[in-house]
Amino acid sequence: MDGKPQYGPICSTQVDPRQIRVVANRHELQVAPHQRVKGMSNLDCLLFAVHIRCIQSYTAKSVADPMEGSGTSRDVVTGLNRYKGSGIRYWGGDLRSGFDLTRQDLPGRFDFVWIHPPYWNIVPCGSGPNDLSNCESYERFREMLTVCLRRCYAALEVGGRLAVLVGDVRRAGRYTPIVRDVLNFPCGEIRSIIIKVQHNCTSDRKRYGRMEDVPIRHEYCIVFKKPVVESRTEMESSRVF
């Protein structure tokens, strides 16, 4: 060990965030995926690493995040533009700011769309009936999630990528593999599946008795590509009804 930070692999590649500074919580930071940085959680550091890797790998010049949340996508693009001169156009929306992906299309076309939907009702957000975290049944959640993914896919430029960050849910011993339904999304072609360690889970704050099964400690980033030539089936599937 020479004292330099060691960067773990993401998928089949490695990210070295020393190559770029990113802006978060109004502070200029250099982050490594494994480090805890003041003002950021481990989860934030890993998310920044995945975001940076995707945007740079796909040379995206326009990025959208229709479920912006705390603004990780916005902060990554801000950092890339400020410190790397990337010139990336960004748009972000969220239910809390008045954008409803279940009813509204994204405003334009983008090279890269990132979406981090709720993991069903594991953490209710309380933003009204069109918040996916408020769905009473998984069937309704799956239906609404599919509508959201179709809108994101429809907003892609030809050759663009859609990245979906999602995790599975276990309630009362029953495992619900949300990733299975995302993988079966009938549009585009799957190009990458990134498995990411999950930190700061709601379940981490609870004490459980003896568990029969291993706790969920991971989530997935599934990347779809919009091909130059789409089949008739894909074009029909991507329509939002």
Image (cartoon, rainbow, N blue to C red):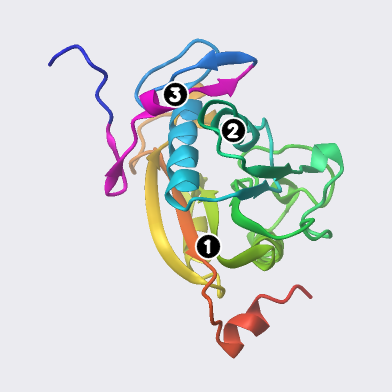
Q: Position of residue 179 (x, y in %)?
A: 48, 58
Q: Position of residue 52 (x, y in %)?
A: 47, 38
Q: Is residue 22 magenta?
A: yes
Furthest-left residue in view?
1
The residue segment tinted magenta is 8-25
Q: Residue at x 27, y 49 (%)?
A: 12
Q: Are marks 2 and 1 in contact (CB under 8 Å)?
A: no
Q: CA distance from mark 1 to mark 3?
A: 25 Å
Furthest-bottom residue in view?
232
Q: Residues within 10 Å of mark 2 (few under 14, many from 20)?
A: some
Numbered label tally: 3
Q: Residues within 10 Å of mark 1 (few under 14, many from 20)?
A: some
Q: Nearer the viewer, residue 167 or 37?
A: 37
Q: Which secondary structure lies at badge 3? A: helix
Circle 3 is placed at which residue position?
42
- Relative height, residue 95 to residue 29 (above, below): below
Compare marks 2 and 1 and give the one earlier in the sequence.
2
Circle 2 is placed at which residue position?
81
